[in-house]
Image: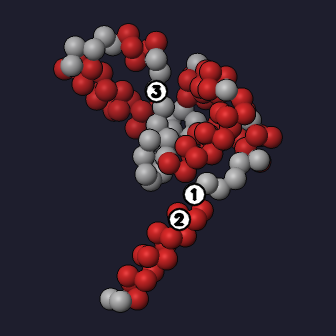
């Protein structure tokens, strides 16, 4: 999970990341077969907030298997994937942590006014 959106789709970033992960696994003596038997995906915190709500409705196995078991869908950003595979569920997603966001934003703005 990343704090910012990396726009992490397609092969441009996926291939270099795959090579780094495989090297680190070798360095730690972790079998490379784990990468294939337990696929991973990268998402931003914003996407994670949305996908956690969709997963709550459809189940993690259904959600992740649709994403990682298909070459083309694996390359999609999570938001695009959710819009294509779970259009009714994504429409029901609500913003999370709005009070916390507003508190952080207010504190940020208050600090800027003091500069």
Query: Which of the two residues, 88 or 19, is positioned nearer the viewer here?
Result: 88
Residue 34 at x, y percent in the picture: 39, 14
What residue do we see at 46% from left, 12% from top? 37
The image position of residue 97, as x and y in percent, is 57, 57
Q: Is residue 108 above or below residue 60?
A: below
Residue 40 numbered tag: 3
Inspect this view and state whether residue 47 appears.
Answer: yes
User: Badge 3 local density, few (<14 within 10 Å), some, or many (20+)?
Assistant: some
**Percent position of residue 109, x then y:** 45, 80
Disc 2 packing (10 Å; few <14; some 14–19; many ≥20): few
Q: Earlier in the sequence, mark 3 or mark 1?
A: 3
The one of 87 and 10 positioned closer to us in this rendering: 87
The reply, left or right, for residue 7 in relation to residue 18 is: right
From this viewpoint, is residue 70 visible? no
Circle 1/circle 2 CB separation < 8 Å:
yes
Seen in the picture, residue 99 relative to 1 is either above or below; the reply is: below
Marked residue nearer the N-terminal end (3 or 2): 3
SS class, disc 1? loop
Q: Residue at x 58, y 47 (%)?
A: 49
As drawn, which residue projects farthest toward the left? Answer: 27
Q: Quadrant of residue 55?
A: top right
Q: Nearer the viewer, residue 104 or 5?
A: 104
Q: Residues within 10 Å of mark 1 (few under 14, many from 20)?
A: few
Q: Point out the residue furthest to the right here.
A: 88
Left or right of 57, for residue 77: left
**Residue that carries the numbered disc 2 in the rendered image:** 101
Q: On the image, numbered disc 1 is attached to which residue?
A: 97
């Amino acid at each position: 999970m990343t704090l910012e959106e990396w726009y992490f789709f397609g092969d441009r970033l996926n291939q270099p990341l795959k090579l780094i992960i495989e090297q680190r696994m070798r360095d730690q003596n972790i079998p490379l077969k784990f990468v294939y038997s337990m696929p991973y995906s990268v998402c931003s915190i914003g996407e994670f907030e949305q996908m956690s709500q969709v997963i709550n409705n459809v189940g993690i196995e259904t959600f992740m298997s649709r994403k990682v078991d298909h070459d083309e869908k694996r390359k999609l950003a999570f938001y695009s994937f959710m819009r294509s595979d779970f259009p009714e569920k994504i429409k029901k997603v609500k913003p999370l942590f709005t009070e916390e966001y507003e508190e952080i934003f207010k504190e940020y703005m208050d600090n800027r006014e003091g500069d």
